[in-house]
Amino acid sequence: MGRGKQQSHLLEFYGIDCDHCVDMEPLIQKLREEEGLGIRRFEVWSNEDNFRVLQRLDQGSACGGVPYFYNKHTRGWICGATTYQNFRNWALGYSYERFLPPPNVEDKKDGKKASAPGIMGIFESVKSFFETVKTEGLDRIQKRTEEKDKDKEPEEPRKKSTLIQRGAFVVAPMRAPHMATDARRCRMDAWP
């Protein structure tokens, strides 16, 4: 690039044969045509110098992968493939999401309305996952309990001594003022 031409402040770090990087190429072209903004591209899988630059910009490995887009003017970045509107906002210095995946390609094929998940969508999917795990775990516990109960022979209830039955003993918590409230207690059902 000649010295007379201004270099772009938008950078892309990509890998050869990276599917998500290839998905972003039409968006890069559209940005160039609509906004007149070019993007400097740096291949990182086979070029160690470019990889070191990526590591410096991706502080703390917040993204840790490619494609990684960096705006030198705003110091903003996008991790992975994204929507065109989000990509355009990032390039122009407007509000954008760092991690906003593009709509699912399968949703477009099925004719469903495709939308990238926002914060609430992500929250709902995580909540749904944990509810499923909880339900499955409770079901497994219930089945194990039922299986143990089937294998056991019914026990005869223990007979309590006649003094306990007549109420001769008073069972109270054994604790001193300095002890915690959950101190050991005498239990009548544990006595012979």
Image (tube, rainbow, N blue to C red):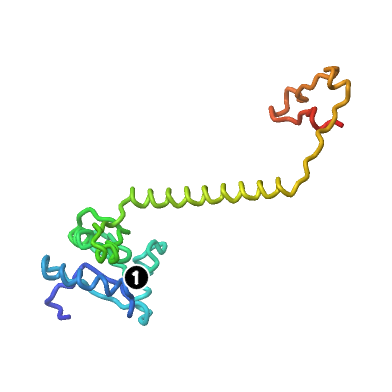
- Front in this rendered view, residue 50 or 168: 168
- Looking at the rendered structure, the number of numbered marks drawn on it comes to 1
Residue beneath disc 1: 66
Residue at 31% x, 78% y is: 43
- Residue 58: image quadrant is bottom left
- Image spot of residue 153 (x, y percent): 78, 44
Look at label 1 and name its amino acid: Val
Q: Is residue 110 left or right of residue 31?
A: right
- Front in this rendered view, residue 115 or 10: 115
- Image spot of residue 1 (x, y percent): 17, 80
The C terminus appears in which quarter of the rendering?
top right
- Image spot of residue 129 (x, y percent): 45, 52
Q: Is residue 152 left or right of residue 99?
A: right
Q: Is residue 18 left or right of residue 129?
A: left
Give the answer, above or below, for where 167 lies relative to 61. above
- Image spot of residue 122 (x, y percent): 36, 52
Q: Residues within 10 Å of mark 1 (few under 14, many from 20)?
A: many
- Residue 103: image quadrant is bottom left
Give the answer, above or below, for where 177 lies relative to 52. above
Residue at 42% x, 49% y is: 128
Give the answer, above or below, for where 158 lies relative to 93. above
Q: Secondary structure at mark 1?
A: loop
Residue at 70% x, 29% y is: 180
Q: Give the farthest residue toward the bottom.
A: 46
- Front in this rendered view, residue 119 or 169: 169
Q: Is residue 2 left or right of residue 96?
A: left
